[in-house]
Amino acid sequence: MEVLIYGTINSMIFALIAVGFSLVYGVSRIPNFAHGSIYVLVGFLTWSFLNDLNLNYFVAICLALAIAALIGLLIYRFILIRLRGMPTSEIIASFAVSLIILEGLRLQGIAGLKGFIGPFYTLAPLIEGKIQIFGVFIDYQRLIILVVGSGVLVLLHLFTRYTKTGLSLRAIAQDEQAAMMLGVNSDRAAMISLSIGSALAGLAAILILPLGNIAVEQGYKVLIHALAVCIIGGLGSWTGTILASFTIGFAVIISTSLFGAMWESVVLVGTIILILLFKPSGLMGKQKELEERV
């Protein structure tokens, strides 16, 4: 029961980390390597708003998420729009933005702080305490992750299927040329996807960071986890992202309970290798269907 409950929660954590990255790539085919840095930046901004400006927790969260969405929009509008269609340049440029953000936080800090280091950079849980479910103690923060994460996935599903903007994003993701012929602005859709994807990365930070410290290294770790989930699920496949999240989430929890936490990275990389050996395009990917049929 403990493996089942914590495996589900761990899977939702992976889904929250990766869904923004998957959304951006699915719509614009842009690998946003600044994803992890925005995650950390939102955590730090929220901490700063709470401790330096003494804002209300809810106000601090909303303000930090708005800044994240704006940063995503600006990254596309002033950098990636000039590199679109050149995958290597997109990766280099977005990763350069990530390095500027993360190493800037590490070296100089923001708002007069002397560097973004130290164990005292933590976010308080949204709700303190824990509850016992089927004999397993679970803190309320993890339950919030499960509930809010499920809500985000449902809302994202409804947004992309029942709103004009969401349908335009789906159209671009499915066939960009046909969508443009029907009047959908490709650059506008990409800009919206970067903005939403960045906000989703920030929301993941708000939910997950209270479980530990805010550290610069988390940005690189989150990026690696997002890439792992998207590669296993199939780049550009939102369904594959969710399926891969549960595959990795349970694999990590089972291996940790059997062999210890030191095996987490080994299991993560091993899962990627196994999936790609048997299905190179990922669980739900379609990029290499021709090669697979041949």
Image (cartoon, rainbow, N blue to C red):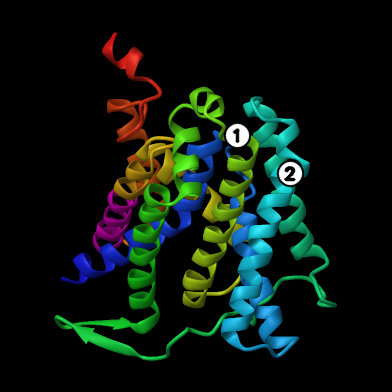
195 is within the stretch colored magenta: no
Q: In the image, which disc is placed on residue 77?
A: 2
Residue type of the residue flagged with mark 2: Arg
Q: Main secondary structure of the magenta part?
A: helix
Callouts 2 and 1 close, C-beta under 8 Å: no
Seen in the image, is 205 located left or right of residue 155?
right
Q: Where 233 falls versus 200 (above or below)?
A: above
The crowd level at tag 2 (other Cα within 10 Å; few <14, some 14-19, many 20+) is some
Measuring 42% from the left and 90% from the top, which residue is drawn there?
Answer: 128
Counting the numbered discs, the total is: 2
Looking at the image, which is closer to me, 113 or 26?
26
Residue type of the residue flagged with mark 1: Ser
Q: In the image, which disc is placed on residue 186?
A: 1
Seen in the image, is 96 located left or right of residue 122?
right
Residue 145 figure quarter: bottom left
Q: Mark 2, mark 1: which one is toward the viewer?
A: 1
Where residue 254 sits in the image (x, y, percent)?
24, 58
Range of magenta residues: 245-259
The crowd level at tag 1 (other Cα within 10 Å; few <14, some 14-19, many 20+) is many
Report whether residue 135 is seen: yes
Secondary element type, mark 1: helix
Between discs 2 and 1, the one toward the N terminus: 2
Image quadrant in which the C terminus is located: top left
Residue 121 figure quarter: bottom right
Secondary element type, mark 2: helix
